[in-house]
Amino acid sequence: MELEQAKNQFINLWGNFGSQWGINRSMAQVHAILITSPNALSTEEIMGKLQISRGNANTNVRELINWNLVYKETILGERREFFRAEKDMWEVAKRIVRERKRREIEPLIQHLNELKTVESDNLEEKKEFENTIESIDRLVNKLDSMSNALMKADEHAFFGKILNLFK
Amino acid sequence: MELEQAKNQFINLWGNFGSQWGINRSMAQVHAILITSPNALSTEEIMGKLQISRGNANTNVRELINWNLVYKETILGERREFFRAEKDMWEVAKRIVRERKRREIEPLIQHLNELKTVESDNLEEKKEFENTIESIDRLVNKLDSMSNALMKADEHAFFGKILNLFK
DNA sequence: AATTGTTTTCATTTTATTTTGAAAGTTTAG
DNA sequence: CTAAACTTTCAAAATAAAATGAAAACAATT
């Protein structure tokens, strides 16, 4: 396949995949275009290549910066801003996990804690509900441990080897 | 907190959480109500408690059955169907992972393979693109290994202990 | 084989999300 | 200071996703 065609296909692929996982299509596509671009891109260039509006490009680039997946870069003598993506995919994974943990898992654990003990005359049902919540809580905490594991495990080496045990 | 109130809060919580992860709100709420119900529920009951339409209830129950998270159950002398959710949350996690692996990760790996080698006059850029795809491929395969690990690791015991090493 | 209870389908409507683009805001340079 | 270059915002429009509900299909019962 020809390089340009492959890049387009990748942009599509990443966009679709992203939207299945709760990341909006444009954001994933902007990410994809930056990941596969050898040099930093301007907003104009992103708009042009993805055929999206200025507002859309700007919003999603900024969101990617919030996720710590993209940096601003200045080019000598150029006034406008350029953007470059983190290309080390292990690093990318760690940052996405870190962010989702912070935004989603941690609040979820908070909420579950509030549901751990309830009042009811029906002791049987009370107990059953509490068991269910407890069991979800254990699961979510395990997910949390996995995030920690992934973030701390320094590159493939150790973590990768452990995973391979299960293959 | 009172039991009924807690259940409602849980239904909300699960619904919100689900929609952040690409599972639609109703489906997550139907799941939540079944998880916290001591007995199997009929479509009518689900419709009533969640205030959703018959079509909506039916579609999402069936989808949950597809995901292998809910079973049909018949009650002696009753003509209509009742539904009960798998309550072992570790089992639930395994099944969700299994399904997402099958539906999303595996196709993604397929697509990435097609992008692994491209043609271009610009050898430098060709190589850079191939490296990027290769690096994404490694990452996705690692994710795949993690799914396998999670599914095979028999309950908390071994897997849990390994995770705790990283805490 | 007709009636009744129940489930499924799907065209339409509703709601939620995303995108647009013009205007406001900001920064830089002369 | 102020004009030009650029970035950000946000109300409105467009699009996508989900929900409705009536009708069709199906299944059990008489």
Image (cartoon, coloured by chain):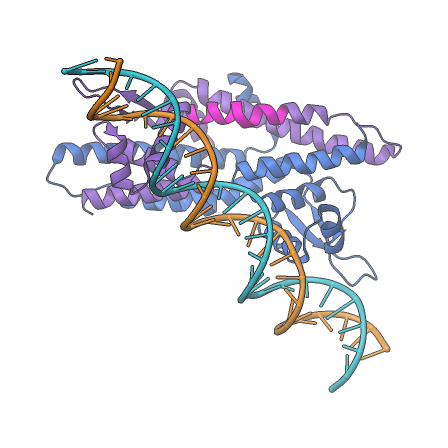
Chain colours: A purple, B blue, C cyan, D orange
Which residue does the image show at 39% across and 47% down from the upper left? B107
Q: Position of residue D3 (x, y in %)?
A: 21, 23
The answer to which quarter of the image holds residue A158 is: top left
Q: Position of residue B137 (x, y in %)?
A: 33, 36
Q: From the viewer's perspective, tell me whether residue A130 is left or right of residue B150.
A: right
Quadrant of the image occupied by residue B154: top right
* Residue at 71 percent of width and 43 percent of height: B33
Q: Position of residue A67 (x, y in %)?
A: 42, 25
Q: Quadrant of the C terminus of chain A?
A: top left
Q: Is residue B25 shown in magenta?
A: no
Q: Is residue B137 visible?
A: no
Name the main secondary structure of what is drawn in magenta: helix
Residue stretch rendered in magenta on the structure: A95-109
The residue closer to the viewer here, A30 or B167, is: A30
Q: Position of residue A51 (x, y in %)?
A: 29, 43
Q: Is residue A98 magenta?
A: yes
- Viewer-nearest residue: B41 or C17: C17
Q: Is residue B27 at least partly visible in the picture?
A: yes
Q: State whether residue A145 is above or below residue A60.
A: above
Is residue A69 toward the left or the right of residue B67 in the image? Answer: left
In the drawing, does residue B142 fall left or right of residue A32? right
